[in-house]
């Protein structure tokens, strides 16, 4: 081919790329007729298996206790099924509606989420669970506003750094506003006494900022300030200090502060290689693991499914992380790349903290295990976030 012909084709390719940068949805619409990439199906499979297995584990971990309490053994399971159905609808909507259309709702969404974070402080509405006033009780329905805050913060920061793509060197226009959002969200969680959610919310913002190209040195400085604020929160109460450091001596604190962690470690050890079998675990009975169906469901899973089940679940999160990174790298536009990066950071940090607390390697912070723990707000929002990740994967290059 002649040199002029090559030059013409390069110019045409450059013009098409510039058009896609100006109107990314046009490129996405032309890709709608193409089959989704392999990562789309892998993510969908992992999320489906996790949700179904989580329902089985919730039933196993809660039914016998409820039966002995004189209520229906299906109560917790039925609620989880309802939330799983609602979450599946949210996943389908988030996976099908063009994610660029969500950008017009990021500011109202953040405002609504902030308002919901203040509701637990209202008398007669707020509900205290595990020393954290982070729940809203509406009759038989209870919600944890911090779960919805995670999604709102993710969308807001991704939209902000997409708009200011060319200004990433200007920290006043990029790092400062995102850190203010992180401080607002995490600060409200700390006021509620929920350190775990504060850490996850900050991690989401830092993940979006990192993927967006924020300079590392000032971002590290902001992270140090955040860690210092968390340290002040812990040191402000001797009770918090004792709870936060109890994992350093699980055996020595097994009668009080590390009681559940110690019992969880026994359950994991008794699971062996193949486990006792679904529904046959013993440590969920009585008062050995009072939070077996929520924060410590990983211990029930390990006892009943054994090392094989543990490897499968941890491996599933690793696969989900790897595919999420691939999706972020291949996203059709900057907003999709930041969404995928934030969701990956969200799932990785939350799963790590939950599992780390169960096995005694980290402090117990009350975080749920995504897709597994009983908790309608957590399951619903996790499925919605997975839908956004599938949406970005479906339109990936």
Image (cartoon, grey):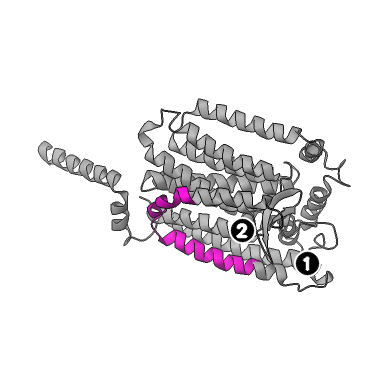
Would you say 245 lies left or right of 56 here?
right
Q: Which mark is residue 177?
A: none
The quadrant of the picture occupied by the N terminus is: top left
Element type where label 2 sits in the image: helix
Q: CA distance from mark 1 to mark 2?
A: 28 Å
How packed mark 1 is, by other alpha carbons closer than 10 Å (few <14, some 14-19, many 20 or more), is some
Residue at horizontal 42 percent and vertical 39 percent from the top: 161
Query: Which quadrant of the view contains residue 201?
Result: top right
The residue where tag 1 is placed is 280
Would you say 108 lies left or right of 376 here?
left
Q: Is residue 371 among what the camera can see?
A: no
161 or 269: nearer the viewer: 161
Horizontal and vertical percent position of residue 193: 71, 44
How packed mark 2 is, by other alpha carbons closer than 10 Å (few <14, some 14-19, many 20 or more), is some
103 or 245: nearer the viewer: 103
Horizontal and vertical percent position of residue 209: 48, 37
Residue at horizontal 44 percent and vertical 49 percent from the top: 327
Would you say 193 lies left or right of 27 here?
right
Q: Main secondary structure of the magenta part?
A: helix
Q: Which residues are the magenta region?
A: 80-108
Asked if disc 1 and disc 2 are in contact, CB closer than 8 Å, the reply is no
The residue where tag 2 is placed is 377
280 or 107: nearer the viewer: 107
Q: Check if residue 96 falls in the magenta segment.
A: yes
Element type where label 1 sits in the image: loop
Camera-near label (1 vs 2) is 2
Q: Is residue 135 among what the camera can see?
A: yes
Residue at horizontal 44 percent and vertical 46 percent from the top: 328
Horizontal and vertical percent position of residue 341: 48, 44
Q: Check if residue 367 falls in the magenta segment.
A: no
């Amino acid at each position: 081919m002649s040199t002029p012909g090559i030059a013409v084709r390069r110019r045409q390719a450059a013009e098409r790329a510039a058009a896609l940068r100006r109107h990314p949805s046009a490129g996405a619409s032309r890709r709608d007729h193409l089959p989704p990439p392999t990562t789309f199906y892998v993510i969908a499979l992992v999320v489906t298996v996790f949700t179904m297995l989580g329902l089985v584990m919730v039933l196993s971990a809660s039914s016998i206790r409820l039966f002995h309490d004189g209520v229906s053994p299906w109560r917790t399971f039925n609620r989880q099924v309802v939330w799983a159905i609602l979450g599946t609808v949210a996943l389908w909507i988030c996976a099908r509606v063009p994610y660029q259309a969500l950008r017009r709702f990021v500011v109202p969404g953040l405002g609504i989420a902030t308002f919901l974070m203040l509701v637990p402080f209202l008398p007669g509405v707020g509900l205290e669970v595990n020393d954290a006033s982070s729940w809203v009780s509406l009759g038989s329905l209870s919600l944890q506003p911090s779960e919805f805050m995670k999604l709102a913060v993710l969308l807001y920061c991704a939209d902000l750094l997409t708009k200011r793509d060319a200004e990433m060197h200007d920290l006043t226009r990029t790092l400062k506003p995102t850190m203010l959002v992180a401080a607002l969200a995490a600060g409200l969680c700390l006021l509620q006494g929920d350190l775990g959610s504060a850490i996850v919310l900050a991690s989401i913002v830092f993940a979006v900022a990192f993927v967006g190209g924020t300079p590392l040195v000032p971002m590290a400085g902001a992270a140090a300030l955040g860690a210092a604020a968390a340290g002040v929160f812990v040191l402000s109460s001797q009770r918090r200090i004792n709870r936060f450091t109890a994992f350093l001596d699980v055996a020595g604190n097994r009668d009080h502060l590390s009681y559940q962690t110690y019992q969880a470690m026994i359950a994991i050890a008794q699971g062996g290689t193949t486990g006792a079998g679904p529904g046959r675990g013993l440590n969920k009975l009585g008062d050995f693991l009072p939070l077996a169906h929520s924060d410590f469901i990983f211990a029930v899973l390990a006892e009943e499914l054994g090392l094989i089940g543990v490897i499968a679940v941890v491996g599933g999160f690793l696969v989900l992380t790897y595919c999420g990174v691939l999706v972020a790298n291949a996203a059709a536009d900057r907003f999709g790349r930041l969404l995928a990066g934030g969701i990956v950071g969200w799932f990785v940090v939350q799963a790590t903290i939950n599992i780390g607390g169960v096995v005694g390697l980290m402090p117990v912070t009350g975080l749920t295990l995504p897709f597994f723990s009983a908790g309608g707000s957590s399951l619903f929002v996790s499925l919605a976030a997975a839908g956004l990740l599938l949406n970005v994967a479906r339109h990936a290059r």
